[in-house]
Image: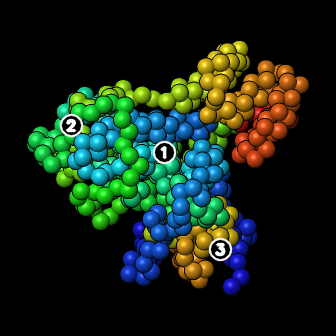
Amino acid sequence: MAGAMGAHSPTAMTPLAIPSIEATPPMTAPDAATELRVEDVYREHFGFVWRSLRHLGVGEPDVEDAVQDVFVVVHAKLASFEQRAQLTTWIYGICIHVTQARRRRAHVRRELPTDPRCLPIDASQQASADEAYERREAESLLDGILDTLAIEQRAVFTLFELEGRSCEEIAQLCAIPIGTVYSRLRLAREAFKRASARLEARERFAGGGK
Amino acid sequence: MKEPRRLLADSQTSELSRSLLAAGRARREPEGARERVWGAVGVALAGSAATAAATGTAAAAGTTGATAGAGAKGAGVALALTKMKLLVAGAVIATAATATVVAVNSDEPVRAARVVSAAPTPAPATTAAKPQPKTERAPEAEAQPAVAPEAKEPKTAVQAVSTAAARPSAAATPLVVIDPAPVEVPPARLDISDLREEAALLQGVRAALGRGDTSDARAKLEEARRRFPNSQLGQEREALDVRIASESGDRTRAASLARAFVEHYPDSPLRAGVESIARAPEKL
């Protein structure tokens, strides 16, 4: 699988154009932004932050911790944030930074991606344990493929394919030109398809899968 | 350029690819995560006040111009303390009586704070804080770090804590060194806000519902309502009330509560869930 997924050459990547926490939010006088409250931002964006962190590669055991990190940063910088229209962009930028920071230190402690199949099953969310296991297995395979993508491609791919965002929205969320969105999406999809095909071939070879 | 078709909507996409993408699309936070994390954020933010008081003593002593306030640093330190408890199970906390707390530029949001446990070397004299009245807060002045932040790449509070946890005796260049004496709230027992307790109570409600014990769920929810009349998790609490009514079989009450919820919180992200519960006995 590695061969098929080695499509993203670091040298082929354009420089990281992920929105910076420092640069993205327009800054203004503090009194202009007092209407924004962290609890409201939390309520509105919790789900998006949780999913974004998972899609970007934060393992399930660590994702709540990472969400906490994101909102502590949001709280810290919210007073100087003005344009609500770009709030999601800003928050997504924080998600990326938090994800990258956690990846960098993943070797320091246990924080390595955990096979979601090994996690306890939340019975309240699942119709059956079998269904839960199958879903987790699919998630695990998906994460395995996504882990081979550079984070720039991963962000675009997951926003488009999993979050259902338009390319225009993604351009805004990632603060990149729309042409870059298309090219990253194309590369990511090619890598995804190749990896998926290899998985299928492996299943066939193993005798028809599960 | 034309918007590409999504792989899930493309008939050429293989079945396996579809199943993987569908699993990714269906990802949702587990039940109770919203409250759990909010409780943890609340701990961090509530703790910032205590930390602000502590750093305030340093500022008042004229050692540095570092600010505390509600900014990244205070929150970061509190977060760091919270994480310390989680990561090292109190091992670092236990040494906090001699801990050196080092703050970095509060203008750098993710580089919130660094906590170095039990620094073996004496604190630099230029930054040592003297005990001051404990209720004093740091001024809301602009931070002018005495020493430029060392790292060029962003460093999260968690990252810093992780480093500290991994290397308990690590030394760092301090900006503000808080003498243990003026810290009003011992790090091992932060003055945690009601938020955390309320979040725990609501988790108890969910757990009771998970067991099918609607009486216990009701009792816990009433306790939360009584203890936290100015709730910060009001939406979550009221949404649970709808669920309790629904799962108790009291559809009339569930519908009535759902209507009240929508009236109170028309823009709530929980609205759809509440309305679906009122229609059918589903869980949030």
Quick one: label 3, few (<14), some, or many (20+) residues within 10 Å?
many
User: Alpha-carbon distance for marks 1 and 3?
Assistant: 28 Å
Where does label 2 land, which residue? B130
* Front position among marks 1 and 3: 1
Chain designation of label 3 = A
Cβ–Cβ under 8 Å for marks 2 and 3: no
Q: Determine whether, in the image, residue A160 is placed left or right of residue B168.
A: right
* Above or below, B281 relative to B158: above
Instruction: Say what secondary structure mark 1 lies in.
Output: helix
Q: Residue, x 10% and y 42% (percent of image)?
A: B121
User: Alpha-carbon distance for marks 2 and 3?
Assistant: 56 Å
Q: Determine whether, in the image, residue A57 is placed left or right of residue A36.
A: left
Instruction: Say what secondary structure mark 3 lies in.
Output: helix
Q: Are marks 2 and 1 on the same chain?
A: no
- The amino acid at mark 2 is Lys
Where does label 1 land, which residue? A68
Q: Determine whether, in the image, residue A95 is placed left or right of residue B180.
A: right
Q: Determine whether, in the image, residue B219 is placed left or right of residue B61.
A: right
